[in-house]
Image (spheres, rainbow, N blue to C red):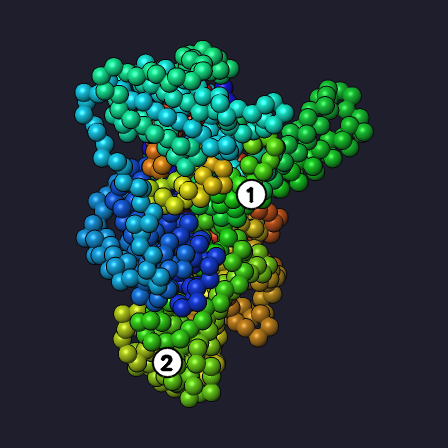
Amino acid sequence: MAIDITQFHETFFEESFEGLDIMESGLLNLDTGAADNDTVNSIFRAAHSIKGGSATFGFTEVAEFTHGMETLLDEMRDGSRDVTQTSVDALLQSVDCLREMLAASRDKTPIDTERAAVLKGELEAILASGTNGSTSESTHQEPATPSSESSASHEGWMIKFKPHHDMLRTGNDPVRMFRELGELGELSVVVDISQLPVLDDLDPEESYLSWELTLKSNVEIEKVKEIFEWVEDECDFVISEIKGEATEDSAKENITASIAEGEAASSTPTKPVNAKPATGAKTSASTDSASIRVSIDKVDALINMVGELVITQSMIGQLDCDFDDFDNSRMEKLRDGLTLLERNTRELQESVMRIRMLPISFAFNRFPRMVHDLCQKLDKKIELKTTGEQTELDKTVMEKIGDPLVHLVRNSIDHGIEMPEERLAANKPESGTIELNAFHKGGNIIIEIKDDGAGFNKDRIKEKAIERGLIASDEHLSDDKIYDLIFQPGFSTAEQLSDISGRGVGMDVVKRNIRELGGSIDVTSEEGNGTTFTIRLPLTLAILDGQLVCVGDEIYITPLVSIVESLQIKEEFVNNIAGQTELYKVREDYIPIVRMHDMFGIDVERKGLEGGLLVVVEGDGKKAGLLVDELLGQQQVVIKSLETNYKRVDGVSGATILGDGTVALILDVDGLIDLSRNPPTAGNKPDNLAREVA
Amino acid sequence: MASILAVDDSASMRQMVSFALKNAGHDVVEAVDGVDGLKAAKANKVSLVITDVNMPNMDGIALIRELRGLPDYKFTPILMLTTESAPHKKQEGKDAGATGWIVKPFDPDQLLATINKVLG
């Protein structure tokens, strides 16, 4: 009955990668010299589990590699080896290597055996370098077996077996051993009851009997010993070979019993293993689909909500749909039911959304290691503090925010935090601090990356920007505008190139990636005191709070977050510049007017502006006024990708289906603002789309 | 068939042990560490315990010691899952009252063969 153990591989890999994370963070927290026992223990356990699992599931190379790590950790654990920086570093590298080996095993790609061999050598060298107490390992070795006379010519074995009084207390039943012996050949058993006390003195939990067993079989001695292996230390056990005629001359008053009857009768004979076919075995044959681990609470909440929904449904169902005598009281009930249904639906939606949410610790976890490694490389001293690790974020957002975060943290380590001597000279603590904070604010998640390093040098940023022609030399800029320059493509102020954060390449990419997630990034800095990057991300990518607006006969959805205000146009505030661009004066600001019907090629009767509605939106720090005909309601909409279903269109971020079944486009506010400044080329003009979709 | 308690902090091992046992017709109670295992053993009187040794919170050795202290588990077979690399663990386990051990790595067939021995 072979069970297909590949069905457990997915779980094995999942838990192994988790184990590696535990090892990594544990190793990073180890104070060399005075290691915390619990930490060492948890690291050891993780290694131990990975080794056990990989051996069980047939990943021999992984198991062999982990063995060295496990041995080293075991010695650290029992105190026979000090925790040194060398061993911690070797173990950290081994963790990396192991992670790759496991990933290769999972993806069925070749394992980089060379790297593994090098690291294995390093570990072995450390192991060979001797321990504190010189407890030689040989103490644990099995006692040498008396030169086994494994000549096949013997007729059988004579066994003297005398359990110690307390053998039964380990759950070992002599009957089991005799039964196993009986399976090896013809067995006769002679019991010695001479030690049996009188009934009053007898303790039923103790063993008083001893046996002489004669096994007629040509099996090897190991086979016989194996049966008694578990009770080796709990009995007197002598085994000798039977040569020629078996001598059965134990001349005491003995009771002879064949094992098949007598006292063994109390327990049922061995049954063959019930050979049921492995039904479930084919269920999860290496599925590659990404999985997500969901806490039971969330699933329970979901089930709970579905329950509520069913109750509501049955409540409405009871309203017997005979419309002829549909009186007021039933109308009332129907209305209640619908209110309830609305609430259930919303809560159900929220519960489902929460399934995709993961604590941000998934993204933060890699930083302790990164900070540790980079500090070593750069000879800096940095302490990493994280807060709000339990703040939850959509899985997709989480995956996409990883790289930008890495880039920002690297920048802080490389360019932000100064060298220890510089810090001391500036009256700051020798060790710098980088804080990663995550929290909810409004409908957003905020992630802060805060360092207490040197901060931005405004003059240098300006100089550089002028040098690169990003700003005019006489331009007067506010601090915010200056800091914003670092997000310009190709901008850098690093004095020295380094392979850690490059030379500022990427800050523009960071910003773009965050914007693609519907988020934004801001920076504040104080020279000498450090820099703070603030990333604002939407809770989820799947749902959006939208304002429905009407342009001609079309309905568009404007993300609520980007709407600043809506106002009715008064002609006297409209200004034309250069004959083309229309500007509208909102208090102190002049904002460009985007005529939506022109942009989307919709015929509107009214050509003038007077009396029209202007929805003032803000995106990427710029404002614009969208000219629409009517403001409809606000509602949550489920975002459907336009790209996957149709094609990318400038000015539109997606589409949704409204309650009445019609398709409405969701406006990409940033894109619209850009479009209003740089008119689109013919091919991608949104009006083509508006017609096609309509 | 028998009711069996399987204690292991590794989800994949637990899954495999549990699947193999269920497949052979046994009832399986799972627990993730010694504390959990002890609780499960008290709640369900099982006729065999299979436990891993290295576990957080309460390790297998301590679990065996605790179980042997319970009247219900005085003589119940308790098998521990050990590795070749830790022979001294076997002795510790025996001293705590383990019936025997199954050496990792093992496959489901070996597991079943061993537990059939002790279940009789």
Give the residue displayed 47% in from the left and 41% down from the top: B95
Q: Secondary structure at mark 1?
A: helix
Quadrant location of the C terminus of chain A in the rendered image: top left
**Residue A456 drawn at (x, y percent):** 42, 80
Give the residue displayed 51% in from the left and 68% down from the top: A591
User: Quarter-wise, where is residue A315 in the image?
Assistant: top right
> Disc 2 residue type?
Met
> Disc 1 residue type?
Val
**Residue A434 drawn at (x, y percent):** 46, 71
**Residue A129 drawn at (x, y percent):** 26, 62
Give the residue displayed 36% in from the left and 43% down from the top: B87
The answer to whether residue A590 of the structure is visible from this angle is yes
**Residue A213 drawn at (x, y percent):** 36, 20
Q: Which mark is residue A468?
A: none
Give the residue displayed 34% in from the left and 33% down from the top: B106
The subunit letter for the residue under badge 1 reads B
- Measure the alpha-carbon separation of dots 2 and 1: 48 Å
Q: In the figure, A423 relative to A234: above or below?
A: below
User: Quarter-wise, where is residue A417 in the image?
Assistant: bottom left
Q: Secondary structure at mark 2?
A: loop
Q: Is residue A119 left or right of residue B108?
A: left
Q: Nearer the viewer, residue A277 or A512?
A: A277
The answer to whether residue A621 of the structure is visible from this angle is no
Q: Which mark is residue B35?
A: 1
Q: Is residue A7 left or right of residue A560?
A: left
Kindly identify which residue carries mark 2: A419
Q: Nearer the viewer, residue A692 or A575?
A: A692
